[in-house]
Amino acid sequence: EQAVEGEFPLTARQYKFFDDNFINSNHWNRQFSFDVEKKISINALEKAFNQVLQHHDALRVSFLQKEKAEWVQICQPISELKQAVFSYDLSNQKCSEQQHSMRRLILEGHQSIRLDRAPLIKAFYFKLDNKAGSLVIISHHLLLDMVSSRIVFEDLMKSYEYLRRGLTCKLPAKTSSLKQWTEYLQSYSLTGNFKQAINYWGNFPDRSEPKLSLDKGFNQSLNIESSAKTI
């Protein structure tokens, strides 16, 4: 399948996100941190990151609010994406200085995520000494969750290892695109075929588990982090 470009509808979860009307919708990010134990090739990392962005259309989307407050997502071509990989050499700093610099640069990375500026996922590599480093990936939650992130990171690691050795990496075959999925959901919602399912799930019995009972005389106010013990 060819790379997807252009405008298409939101998913149900994306609609819910914008309906919640957060104070700052740009800042709803996930952060993933990885310790790097050997020298990394920034050139290979950049190429691998771009290959993953090209392969997964959902990672190239930005969001635009149109007339009547309607939100849409737009999948950008890889050539129009802003810089996605950043590298910082902190090897000349003391450990405490490195931690301070990393916190500052990571915060700036979070603040740089804007819904209208793809990509909404960025990588930051910090060189800490001649070998070790830290790789931090920041993504808006509209792009990645804990399930999809595993798929993306597996592809990123595979692509990087191939490119680092000067080889060509072929990622797994693409499935239905996000564009196809959202357009199908939109067309299905217009059929009304789902209405009978609403009654079924609306009357579904509550299967929530009962709360665990507490010890007699237990003071709930003492149930704080500082009282935690490891057995």
Image (cartoon, rainbow, N blue to C red):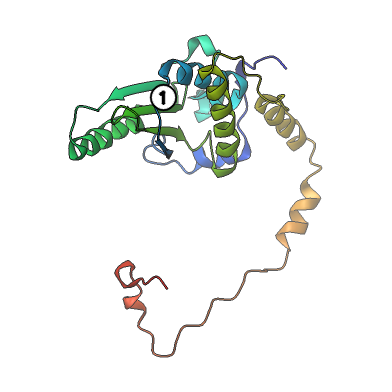
Tag 1: Cα neighbours inside 10 Å, few (<14), some, or many (≥20)?
A: some
Q: Say whether residue 13 is left or right of residue 88.
A: right
Of 112 and 187, nearer the camera is 112
**Where residue 79 appears, x then y in whole percent?**
51, 9
Q: Say which quadrant the C terminus sits in.
A: bottom left
> Which quadrant of the figure has residue 218?
bottom left
**Where residue 40 appears, x then y in whole percent?**
41, 24
User: Looking at the picture, does residue 64 appear above or below residue 201?
Assistant: above
Q: Say whether residue 63 is left or right of residue 22.
A: right
Q: Say whether residue 174 is left or right of residue 213.
A: right
> Which quadrant of the figure has residue 94?
top left
How many callouts does the rendering have?
A: 1
Q: Say whether residue 201 is left or right of residue 100.
A: right
Residue under the image location 78 percent in, 45 percent down:
194
Q: Which residue of the protein is positioned furthest toward the bottom in this rendering?
A: 216
Say if residue 175 shows up in the picture: yes
Residue under the image location 41 percent in, 41 percent down:
22
Q: Say which quadrant the N terminus sits in.
A: top right
Of 53 and 58, nearer the camera is 53
User: Looking at the picture, does residue 44 appear above or below residue 131?
Assistant: above
**Where residue 212 appears, x then y in whole percent?**
53, 78
